[in-house]
């Protein structure tokens, strides 16, 4: 369906992960180039076209996506908006069911149908804009997606079914995009993918993340490069070497481990066991002293026994991750684990998640207390509640600790400062300005 436009005001609603956010930013840049006005405020009455970029990863995300679609479908039905389109993971996975059930939506599109979405809205896809985006993050940091899809066969994950096989972008294309971001004032790049460490195997026939990093650190204006979503099995050691030697690469690694029980890891098809996991963590910490490790765990996986959960708890206490996220298992259609009995109640799943987070809260408190008296390089993200809110290299935006500095100082968002830590809480640090960094 092609839209008859009187005005060109469009709102893009992004749900789910940072990878979805990048897709939305690419879409918005294309729309801008065709004369559309991007409306950031969802309550703006002048919005006449809404595009929802959905998530379909786990049950909670699917429910949020459905609720959002229904809310805007109601607005479409009552003529508060003229046109409504849906894209992204949920639309990719359940396009027929959604089309049959929600008639107020003018079109459903999958994850790789950008030209088709633009055509439906009344815009033209421009190849010359490849690598350009309309940034929705604060102007000093941006996510940089280096590949799409995943070749892993994790039993609980539907991402390969939705996003397809792993496809690396070329180093040249990624560098071009990073240079564009730097030209817009971006100082911190957050590298993302379904699996960073698989990068390059498809197009260069070898793991090439370190080669990519060697090129990215050369870009003028980029001060920090942060690595997210690194699969632990067959972790490329040359990445550790460049992380240890290159000051632009943050001493930070997001490495989802999911569990520590050998039986569960085998059922999950994770290709690493408890011994290899411990060996990798030891190696990372030896080669990069002071590194902040973030991981995620899944509790309530089919058949997870009390003893296996206790093993996981002891592992968390033993390793003391700097940052930890916990998911409760949810069965996903057409995954390998979907055929297993989902035999642990939602109540027990949530109880186990809460127990892990209580342990992590104490670990985080203990680690933060050790920061008191230290001076850290801090980037300022925003001003809020009487404080300037910033982060060190050890923390990623939105998911990790923040450093709060009293507003008595006149600071600039996006600038770096040396901050002396004066006080600690479980998930926040407090500090005072020691000096500015030019």
Image (cartoon, rainbow, N blue to C red):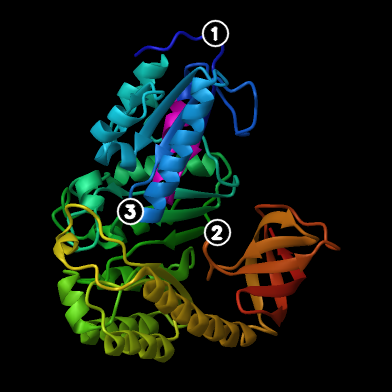
Q: Quadrant of residue 123?
A: top left
- Residue at 51% in and 82% down: 358
> Looking at the picture, how far across and down is residue 291, in whole percent?
46, 77
Q: Is residue 6 visible?
A: yes
Assign the N terminus to one quadrant of the image.
top left
**How far separated are the C-alphas under marks 1 and 2?**
37 Å
The magenta region covers 13-30
Q: Which residue is mark 2?
A: 398
Q: Nearer the viewer, mark 2 or mark 3?
A: 2
| Label of residue 6 in the image | 1
Vertical relation: 259 (above or below) 8: below
- Compared with 250, 36 (above or below) is above
Q: Are marks 2 and 3 in contact (CB under 8 Å)?
A: no
Could you say which disc has been placed on residue 193 in the image?
A: 3
Give the mark nearer the N terminus: 1 vs 3: 1
Residue in front for this viewpoint, 310 or 181: 310
Sequence-first disc among 2 and 3: 3
Give the foreground label among 1 and 3. Answer: 1
Kindly identify which numbered label has been placed on residue 15. none
Q: Are marks 1 and 3 in contact (CB under 8 Å)?
A: no
Q: Secondary structure at mark 1?
A: loop
One can see residue 25 in this view: no
Residue 342 found in image quarter: bottom left
Q: Residue furthest right?
A: 408
255 relative to 67 in the view: left or right = left
Quarter placement of the C terminus? bottom right
Callout 2 environment at 10 Å: few (<14), some (14 to 19), or many (20+)?
Answer: few
Q: At which x and y percent is residue 97? A: 26, 34
């Amino acid at each position: 369906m092609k839209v008859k436009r009187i005005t060109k005001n469009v709102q893009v609603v992004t749900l789910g992960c940072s990878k979805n956010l990048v897709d939305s930013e690419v879409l918005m840049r294309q729309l801008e180039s065709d004369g559309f006005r991007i409306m950031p405020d969802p309550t703006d009455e002048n919005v006449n076209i809404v595009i929802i970029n959905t998530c379909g990863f786990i049950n909670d995300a699917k429910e949020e996506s459905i609720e959002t679609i229904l809310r805007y479908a109601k607005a479409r039905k009552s003529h508060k908006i003229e046109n409504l389109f849906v894209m992204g993971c949920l639309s990719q996975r359940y396009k027929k069911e959604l089309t049959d059930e929600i008639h107020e939506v003018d079109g459903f599109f999958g994850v790789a149908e950008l030209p088709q979405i633009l055509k439906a809205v009344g815009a033209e896809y421009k190849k010359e804009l490849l690598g350009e985006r309309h940034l929705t993050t604060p102007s000093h940091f941006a996510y940089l997606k280096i590949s799409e899809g995943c070749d892993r066969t994790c039993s609980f994950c539907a991402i390969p079914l939705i996003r397809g096989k792993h496809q690396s972008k070329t180093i040249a294309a990624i560098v071009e995009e990073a240079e564009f971001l730097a030209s817009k004032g971006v100082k911190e790049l957050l590298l993302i993918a379904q699996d960073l460490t698989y990068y390059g195997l498809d197009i260069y026939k070898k793991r090439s993340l370190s080669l990519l990093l060697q090129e990215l650190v050369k870009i003028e204006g980029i001060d920090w490069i942060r690595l997210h979503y690194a699969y632990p099995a067959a972790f490329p050691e040359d990445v550790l070497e460049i992380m240890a030697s290159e000051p632009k690469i943050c001493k930070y690694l997001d490495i989802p481990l999911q569990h520590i029980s050998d039986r569960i890891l085998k059922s999950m098809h994770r290709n690493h066991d408890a011994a290899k996991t411990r060996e990798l963590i030891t190696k990372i910490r030896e080669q990069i002293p002071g590194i902040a490790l973030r991981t995620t765990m899944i509790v309530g996986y089919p058949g997870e026994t009390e003893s296996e959960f206790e093993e996981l708890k002891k592992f968390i206490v033993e390793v003391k991750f700097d940052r930890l996220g916990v998911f409760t298992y949810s069965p996903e259609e057409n995954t390998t684990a979907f055929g297993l009995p989902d035999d642990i109640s939602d109540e027990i799943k949530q109880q186990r998640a809460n127990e892990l987070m209580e342990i992590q809260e104490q670990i985080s408190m203990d680690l933060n207390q050790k920061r008191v008296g230290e001076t850290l390089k801090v980037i300022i993200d925003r001003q809020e509640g009487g404080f300037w809110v910033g982060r060190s290299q050890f923390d990623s935006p939105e998911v990790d600790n923040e450093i709060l500095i009293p507003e008595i100082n006149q600071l600039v968002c996006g600038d770096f400062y040396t901050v002396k830590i004066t006080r600690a809480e479980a998930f926040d640090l407090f500090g005072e300005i020691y000096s500015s960094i030019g």
